[in-house]
Amino acid sequence: MKISLIIPFYNVEAYLGRCLESIIAQTYTNLEIILIDDCSTDNSSQIAQDYARQDNRIRVMKHNENKQQSGARNTGLRHATGDYIWFIDSDDQIASHHSMMALVAALEHHNAPDVLIFGFTVYKVGDQLLGKSYIQSPRLTAVTPKDIAPYFAGERWYYTSIGEMVWNKLFRRSFLDRIGATFQENMLYEDNITPYWIFCADRILLMPEMHYHYYLRHGSTTTSDAPANFVEHRIRYMEQAVAFIQRHPALQLYQGYLTLFLLRQVFDPRLARIIASYDRRKQRIVTEQLVRSFLAGVDTTTLIASLQGEHTKIMAEQILHDSVREFVRLATQGSYVQAYRILSHQPRWIDHLLRVVKLCLPYALVRMMQQRRASLAS
């Protein structure tokens, strides 16, 4: 069984060697290592070429124009020939020299599932451990799409191993070909589409062991400030996700849940903070764009019909079904800003006032007592 590892890189001279060392040291050796140089301007290109000369499993491909990580991943995917695909970030590393051996053994033992999902650890640069993905299943567990929704619930958003990140998963290449899996180019958080791929799989394997080290470093996509056109990125992603669902009839079985999942992805706290930083006029414009784009792509009737119970937990957030119903009601009436506020958790002015009073009241009382004592003393 051959595994294709796809590693895009751009100006990561400080980290690329560490990443490649963790790969070439694997005790499982049937690997195809594809490096995509996305127009680096530092010494990354030379480092990649040096490793390629030392190891004939390594191929270096170079873009003539910067296509960002999504475009580089697509390039690697087009040229990969392995049975399975592993997308690895160039500033991360495989956890153990024996990780690949363990992953391949799991794939072979379970008759080549479409997707294998495994645990990871998160570090700050300097090897300071920040946390581990929590164990969603205590043992190697095979599931199907109809069983998988509970695993997306999560206890901690970023540490949900089955979630949106692509780097802690192995995908059967024939499966990716079958569903037409690609990344939206020139878009932030392009791997947010990953959960929709998973719902297309016939068989999914969950593995509790940690086999990937993810590094949060200054200047990466995760830690950088959002660009001025972040809302446009979210709208493009929403259109991509809706189009993907519509292209795959099998996903109609899960359309209500996936629409709720899309709400969780798009109307998230980070987006709310960004929009809150705009002036009032721009807030109105972008919130209308977001809500109208959502309404144009989804079947709200199916969404409402799918709501069972009081809430659904997705990636550690409780989504209240009454809030979703109110969002749909307001949005379909054309009250886009009010609908957005329902899901964005934006507090009303009275909530701001109460919060200020709650914070200031103890200090005000102390000050009044001090003044009263001073008055009595005089």
Image: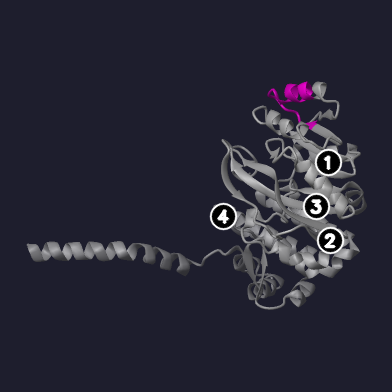
The numbered dot on residue 273 is: 4
Q: Secondary structure at mark 2?
A: helix
Determine which quarter of the picture holds residue 14.
top right
Q: Is residue 258 magenta?
A: no
Q: Secondary structure at mark 1?
A: helix
Which quadrant is home to the C terminus?
bottom left
Of the residues shown, which amino acid type is indicated by label 3? Leu
**10 Å neighbourhood of mark 2: few (<14), some, or many (≥20)?**
many
Q: Which residues are magenta?
A: 36-51
Q: Is residue 40 magenta?
A: yes
Whether the residues at callouts 2 and 4 have beta carbons within 8 Å, the answer is no
Q: Residue at x 83, y 47 (%)?
A: 105
| Alpha-carbon span between mark 1 and mark 3 | 20 Å
- Mark 1 or 3 closer to N-term? 1
Look at mark 1 in the image and give the residue it sits on.
Answer: 74
Look at mark 2 in the image and give the residue it sits on.
Answer: 245
**10 Å neighbourhood of mark 1: few (<14), some, or many (≥20)?**
many
Q: Is residue 318 above or below residue 237?
A: below
Look at mark 3 in the image and give the residue it sits on.
Answer: 116
Q: Is residue 27 above or below residue 341?
A: above
